[in-house]
Image (cartoon, rainbow, N blue to C red):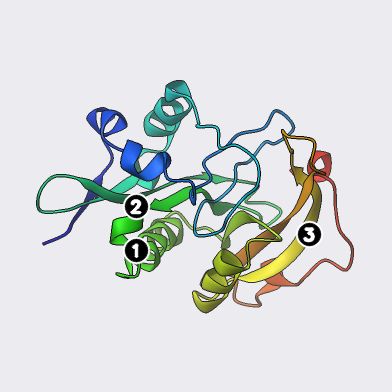
Amino acid sequence: MTTVRAFTCDDLFKFNNINLDPLTETVSYPAQRRCSVPLPGRFPEPISQYGIPFYLQYLAHWPEYFIVAEAPGGELMGYIMGKAEGSVAREEWHGHVTALSVAPEFRRLGLAAKLMEMLEEISERKGGFFVDLFVRVSNQVAVNMYKQLGYSVYRTVIEYYSASNGEPDEDAYDMRKALSRDTEKKSIIPLPHPVRPEDIE
């Protein structure tokens, strides 16, 4: 039976089966304040991992947003990591999905949807107006999955993903799902024009 529980420091030594998979993108770029959301999709450039201090920062500041799914044998099946951020006054207080990843052998079991649901429930309890995430424009498998979970494209962020092998930088979709506090769904009204990474608050 799958166990869904809080992520612990010990899990940092057990999740390489998830993070080292070539279909997973847990990368960080200097120009970005936020991070990419991994899930199925093939990317041409090398994969680079978040550093241990990065995970520990999230574990220390937003432990309730760091959740792992564990198989009966003790191996990690997948995890989600996120945070709460934004301005309440401007109705931008929200949950953000920093990383979502499921090991290849445990895909198509509904784990990604379950982990997303749990993060959304946490954001609801914290009074968030919406949940958002970033995904490569080219990663249509992930984009379609998030659409099935109720997310829509709020805006396009130009050259959000930096290429490391001479390829051009790639745009990202900022996808959002309104929560119950946003009764008029104002947070998901699409912007009519793209933005640049430095314009993201």
Foreground residue, 24 or 110? 24
Describe residue 36's horizontal placement relative to residue 60 as left or right: right
Tell me the crowding category of disc 3: few under 14, some 14 to 19, or many 20 or more residues within 10 angstroms, Cα based. many
Foreground residue, 38 or 131? 38
Amino acid at pointer 1 = Arg
Disc 3, SS: strand
Describe residue 48's horizontal placement relative to residue 3 as left or right: right
The residue beneath circle 1 is: 107
**Which x, y percent locates residue 100?**
45, 52
Amino acid at pointer 2 = Ala
Tag 3 or tag 1, which sits nearer the N-term? Answer: 1
Tell me the crowding category of disc 1: few under 14, some 14 to 19, or many 20 or more residues within 10 angstroms, Cα based. some
**Which x, y percent locates residue 107?**
34, 63
The residue beneath circle 2 is: 103
Q: Which mark is residue 156?
A: 3
Disc 1, SS: loop
Q: Work out which residue is located at the far top of the displayed protein and give it.
A: 53
Q: Quadrant of the N terminus?
A: bottom left
**Which x, y percent locates residue 123?**
45, 57
CA separation, marks 2 and 3?
A: 28 Å
Residue 188 visible at all = yes
Describe residue 145's horizontal placement relative to residue 117 as left or right: right
Tags 2 and 1 in contact by the CB under 8 Å rule? yes
Tell me the crowding category of disc 2: few under 14, some 14 to 19, or many 20 or more residues within 10 angstroms, Cα based. many
